């Protein structure tokens, strides 16, 4: 038997719940660390056996019953989840969610990662037309705004080079 096996049983053996086996006794005789722990457990159990619970006050039961009556007399406030248990509110919430999901699906909705809505092409747009140019500008807005930063950087570099 190894130390981990005896340590799993040590508390039960020290408390007297389980009797020590021959293997337990052999291991404790040969292992000083486990024998020391077993002795500490036995001393602790002996102290716990000597301990007496203090007596309750003679008026404890009377005060407890009075306190329970006071608590029962206080009107209970509804918690954050209590409103959901009411059928009318639960039905209204279900209806609102259903309408929201229905509107989202009817709009053909999916959401871009940046939070903007996707647009659905209703007709094929010919390249080079005003509509296709506006769609290209709208789809590439982030890229074009970065070009403005490059222009500002070029102006600053020109100013540094030609004071």
Image (tube, rainbow, N blue to C red):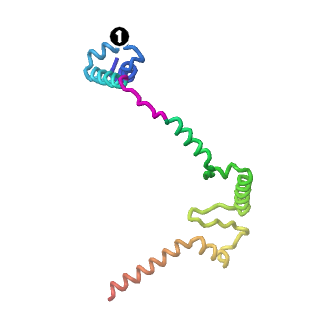
Residue drawn at 68 percent across, 61 percent down? 109
Residue closest to the eye, 78 or 4 = 78
**Residue shown at 48%/78% (left/top)?**
148
Q: Position of residue 2 (x, y in %)?
A: 33, 20
The x, y position of residue 93, in whole percent, is: 70, 55
Mark 1 residue element: helix
The tally of labels here is 1
In this rendering, is residue 91 above or below 163?
above
Q: Nearer the viewer, residue 145 or 89?
A: 89
Taking the image as shown, residue 82 lies to the left or right of residue 19, namely: right
* The quadrant where residue 3 appears: top left
Assign the C terminus to one quadrant of the image: bottom left
> Which residue is rendered at x = 38% and y = 82% of the image?
156
- Estimate the x, y position of residue 43 in percent, counting from the top left: 31, 23
For residue 57: magenta? yes
Seen as rendered, the residue at the extreme front is 58
Q: Is residue 33 left or right of residue 65?
A: left
Relative depth, front residue between 161 and 1: 1
Q: Residue furthest top?
A: 22
Residue 28: give x, y in percent of width and height.
29, 17
Few, some or many residues within 10 Å of mark 1 (<14, 14–19, 20+): few
Magenta extent: 49-58
Q: Is residue 3 above or below residue 145?
A: above
Q: Nearer the viewer, residue 119 or 38?
A: 38
Most frequent secondary structure within the magenta stretch: loop
Q: Is residue 4 visible?
A: no
Residue that label 1 marks: 22
Would residue 120 be visible to someone looking at this image?
A: yes
Going 43% across and 30% down the picture, which residue do you hit?
Answer: 55
Determine which quarter of the picture holds residue 19.
top left
Quadrant (top left, top right, bottom left, bottom right) of the N terminus: top left
* Left or right: 138 as drawn, with respect to 89: left
């Amino acid at each position: 038997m190894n130390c981990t096996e005896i340590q799993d049983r040590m508390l039960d053996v020290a408390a007297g719940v389980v009797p020590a086996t021959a293997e337990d006794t052999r291991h404790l005789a040969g292992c000083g660390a486990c024998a020391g722990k077993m002795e500490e457990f036995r001393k602790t159990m002996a102290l716990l056996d000597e301990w007496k619970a203090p007596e309750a006050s003679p008026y404890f039961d009377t005060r407890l019953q009075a306190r329970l009556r006071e608590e029962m007399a206080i009107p209970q406030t509804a918690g954050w989840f209590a409103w959901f248990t009411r059928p009318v509110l639960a039905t209204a919430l279900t209806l609102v969610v259903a309408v929201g999901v229905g509107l989202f699906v009817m709009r053909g909705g999916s959401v871009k990662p940046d939070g903007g809505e996707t647009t659905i092409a209703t007709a094929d747009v010919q390249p080079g037309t005003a509509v296709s140019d506006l769609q290209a500008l709208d789809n590439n807005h982030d890229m074009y705004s970065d070009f403005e930063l490059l222009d500002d950087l070029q102006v600053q570099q020109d100013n540094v080079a030609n004071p």
